[in-house]
Amino acid sequence: MDRDFENENNDILPFKTSSSKDKAAAKIWVTASGKGGVGKTFVSSSLGITLSKLGHSVVIVDLDLSGANIHTVMGVKPSHMNIRHYFEGVKTLQELVIPTQHSNLSYVQGFWDSWSPIDFTMEQIQALIPQLHGLRADYVIVDLGAGALEPHLELFKAADEKFLVTSPEPTSIEKTYRFIEAFVCHTLKQDSTPESYGNMISTLRSHRQRTLGKPFSFRSFLKEETGLNYDFFESLTAKPVRLIVNSCRYQNHSELGYGIKSVCNKYYDLSIDFAGAIDFDNAVWQSVKGREHVLFAQPFTGLAGQFLTTCKQLIDPEELRAVV
Ligand SMILES: Nc1ncnc2c1ncn2[C@@H]1O[C@H](COP(=O)(O)OP(=O)(O)OP(=O)(O)O)[C@@H](O)[C@H]1O
Ligand SMILES: [Mg+2]
């Protein structure tokens, strides 16, 4: 059923019903990074816009617990209704969905009142996941804050598609590897007792100190040194972490993703996917200043093509709809 919705200017906007109503659960795409400021919010918003242009209904959920930015890149003022109302039990997540002026595209406002933080329990985050799947949309894009915090890792783990954004800078690349290691450990932690996890971490630490710089297989390590369940490596191959290298200025930046992929293979025995290189373009931040997302302000640029290529690779071909 259609319903009306109020935006931050108190205008009544029509709520755009999902084409997937009464269909399958919304697919969750999560965007994370080891380092801050590398372009997660730009990538999340761009993936969402691209999917919406392909005819899919999209809700972008701003879950940057340190301060919301999705509304900023979408060119709208922060709404008084935000994700805090969900966590405080005042509203359902669906009730917080705010339509945009663009068809198929809505968002959930994140915390802008970060002077009053909420300490999330793992239970709250786990309870959020079915709510995200239950949103009336084909795709729910979750924009996280920076770093390998437990809530981030938990949401990343639950995602149908996991995007890890890095810039080509060494500081960001280093934190990308740390994020991947933290993600592996987080997943193992949940499959183990605190005691066996503690033993595994101390064995891992001394093993890595002995073998630093040499190829290392998480999989073999777990098999040989501990009694832990290592089956999740199979699911990681089926649903790999997808790396996006953002803000590429040179050809060698664009190729960096292949290097990171092969390091993960060689040093962790982990398969990740290089999902795309995105150019650095001054139009990105200029369009934020101009309060219109670059993919709307300049829809036919190389940047738009790069996001289109990434999205098309990940959408079921049967779901590809001819729009754009
Ligand atoms: N491809 C790009 N070309 C040019 N500028 C970019 C590009 N991607 C992002 N930016 C700019 O870089 C800055 C940081 O981007 P963004 O806010 O998306 O990063 P973030 O990872 O979400 O940051 P945070 O960790 O604070 O949430 C912004 O000013 C944005 O406009
Ligand atoms: Mg951000």
Image: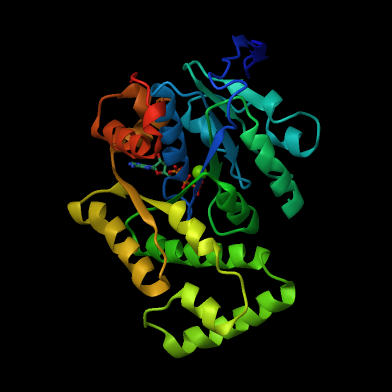
Q: In the displayed structure, would residue 117 be above or below residue 1?
A: below
Name the spot of residue 214 as percent of width and height, x first. Answer: 37, 83
Q: Is residue 5 visible?
A: yes
Q: Is residue 131 left or right of residue 205?
A: right
Tell me the quadrant of ligand 1.
Answer: top left
Closer to the camera in the image, 252 or 204: 204
Residue at image location 62% in from the left, 21% down from the top? 22
Picture quadrant where residue 82 is located: top right
Residue at image location 69% in from the left, 31% down from the top? 93
Q: Is residue 184 left or right of residue 297?
A: right
Name the spot of residue 188 as percent of width and height, x first. Answer: 61, 67
Q: Is residue 293 visible?
A: no
Closer to the camera in the image, 308 or 170: 308
Name the spot of residue 197 as percent of width and height, x first. Answer: 66, 75
Q: In the displayed structure, would residue 17 be above or below residue 197?
A: above
Q: Which quadrant holds the N terminus?
A: top right
Name the spot of residue 282 as percent of width and height, x first. Answer: 29, 37
Closer to the camera in the image, 290 or 36: 36
| Residue that lies at the very extreme toward the right in this rendered image | 89
Residue at image location 61% in from the left, 78% down from the top? 201
| Residue that lies at the very extreme toward the left in this rendered image | 251
Q: Is residue 180 left or right of residue 259?
A: right
Residue at image location 30% in from the left, 31% down from the top? 304
Q: In the displayed structure, would residue 159 be above or below residue 226?
A: above
The structure's colour scheme is: rainbow
Picture quadrant where residue 60 is located: top right
Closer to the camera in the image, 316 or 311: 316
Q: Which quadrant holds the C terminus?
A: top left
* Numbered disc total: 0
| Residue that lies at the very extreme toward the bottom in this rendered image | 210
